[in-house]
Structures are given as structure tokens and as C-alpha cells.
Image (cartoon, helix red, strand yellow):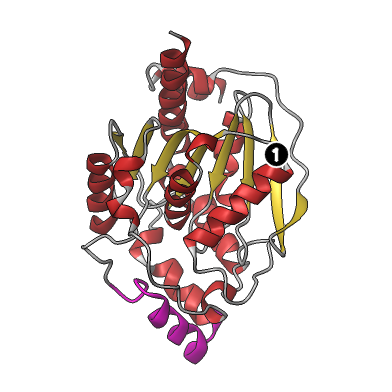
Amino acid sequence: MRDAMSATCRSIVGVALLACTIAPRAVEAQGQYAIINGARIYYEVEGTGHALVLIHGWPMSARMWDEQARVLKNYYQVIRYDRRGFGRSPGTPGTEQSAEHDAQDLEALLGYLKVSHAYVLGHSQGGAVAQQFTLDHPDQVDALILHGAPIDGFVLPETGPFSGAGSVRELMQKSGMAEFRRQWLAHPINHVPEGRPEVAALIADIVANYSGDDVLKMVPKRSGGVPVIERLNEIKVPALVLVGGEDLPFFQISADALAFEIPGAQKVVVPGGAHLVNIIEPERYNAEVLRFLRGVERSRAH
């Protein structure tokens, strides 16, 4: 087993070696709750150093970052939380579908934790939250990582049965949450390679704890304002765009658009996984995150 682990570490170059280095284990996080913006938000903080915020996608929770927190807490103060309506954070009717409201929640959570600025990593819908937060609070973001993220106002809309809240709500209401979960887990977006039952079990368990409140209790998103895609050029912090090598075409195209529109953004394709490549290939994924953030720190040191 030790030889196998060593071989794995050697197979990943550069910063991947850093990710595989044995470091003193930090104390395991104890989940806590913050009452912010009228919501009860579950969060975990692990490690020390520069703050790194992990924002989960839909319909996941902070648990999707287990393998990232396990490694990254050795280098950063890792903050992950369940967005309202997901995981262990109860939903509040009429507010969950707004990336702007999610960005306000994140601002309030960082204020509660007395964190003035941070690196921000967002997955999928959490990536949309990360974009909005960076635009709303540019002085609080030191680097931005977007993984499998859509873009508000993108002229190429997502397609399929899970592309809009209306069709998802209809499925939940007519067929129930159990049927929704069955269909969602069978969707290619959640593809897990054969021989990885532990990954499939984790994803299924996270989805089993999704209440559907953000869809069932939502009100229409307010109109107005400039779409985020027209403001991406305002993002001036270092940015990394990640996408799984086997992710759906929509997210591949979206990643290209983000990398094109955000000044100086890097794009990296992480092989071996689809939309949840961070769970399927955590060593590769963590290595890219560390490579990027170490590069940001080196550039600022000069």
C-alpha cells in the first residue's frame, strides 16, 4: 500500500508532489452554525493561513469538498459551508434561487468569521455565486477558481430535463423527491467511472439529504441589472477555470467562455472525471488548485 501511494505521488509532477507530502494533520473541523441574513448556515473551518472558501454546487453540500479540505487545510484556512436550502442549512422560501442573495450570505458569513479577504473556489451553481461575490466585493477576493461553472446571461442556454427550475419543480411535485433523486443520480452529469462505488455512494448520500426547498419554495428571480457575462471583464484578480475532461459539452463551452472573458484567466482540463471531477480525481484536482494558488502567492511576493 505504501509503495502504491508513493507511485501515485510520483506520477503527478510539480505541485502534485506538494499535495502528496505528509503534513501534520490539523484538528478535524467541528461543524457550527451562524445565524446570518435571517438564515441558519452550517459551516466548517479547518487549517490555518490564508482563507480559502469552497462553495458547493446544486444539489450538493459542503461534503462534496471532503477530499479537498483533507489536503488543502494543511496549507490554508479552509472554509466550507452549506448554502441555504442545501445540506444542513435550512432553506428560506423565496430566496434560494438568487446568486445575488447567496453572495450576500457569503459576505455575511465571512464577516461573522472575521475574514476580510480570501481565495474563492466555486463549483457549478456555486461558481455562479463566486462570480457574483467577486463582482460585488472585489476587495475581498484575492484569487478566483471556477469549476464547471455556468454564466448568468450566457447566450447558449443549458438544455435537457434539469436545465431549468420549472422542469425540475414539475418533476418534484408530480413524481416526488425520491423519483427526482433517482433521475438526477442517473443523469450523465453525475457519471462515476466503474470501480468507484465509494464515490457513487457519497454522491447519492449527499443528494439524499437535499430537500428541494430551493426549487419548491422559490419565487421568480427579479429581473433587471447587467448580466454577469457582460461584467466578467471587471474581474481583475487571478482566475483559474477548471473543468472535468468528461464533463458535459455545455460546461466545456462555458469554461472556454469564462477563460476568454475574464482577463488573464487560466483554463485547465482535469482528466478522469466529469462534473464532479474533484471527487473522482481528487489528487489531480488538488494539485491544480495548489499549483495555481502557489503561483498567485509567488507573483505577489515579487
Q: Is residue 94 magenta?
A: no
Quadrant where the image shows the N terminus: top right
Q: Main secondary structure of the magenta part?
A: helix
Looking at the rendered structure, the number of numbered marks drawn on it comes to: 1
In front of the other: 211 or 274: 211
Q: Which residues are magenta?
A: 160-178
In the rendering, at what x and y percent does residue 189 appear? 36, 60
Quadrant where the image shows the C terminus: top left
In the rendering, at what x and y percent does residue 225 appear? 37, 63
Question: Quick one: which residue is furthest to the bottom in this view?
Answer: 174
Where 115 sits versus 273, above or below? above
Where 251 sits versus 294, above or below? below
Q: Is residue 213 visible?
A: yes
Question: Quick one: which residue is furthest to the front in this view?
Answer: 225
In the rendering, at what x and y percent does residue 182 appear? 48, 74
Residue drawn where x is 21% and y is 63% of the image: 156
Q: Is residue 170 magenta?
A: yes
In front of the other: 124 or 15: 124
Residue drawn where x is 40% and y is 81% of the image: 166
In front of the other: 266 or 61: 266
In the rendering, at what x and y percent does residue 262 appear? 29, 39
Picture quadrant where residue 84 is located: bottom right
Residue type at tag 1 = Val
SS of the residue under disc 1: strand
Q: Is residue 7 visible?
A: no
Where 264 sits versus 261, above or below? above
In this image, 297 relative to 236: left or right? right
Residue drawn where x is 47% and y is 47% of the image: 122
Which residue was labeled with disc 1?
Answer: 45
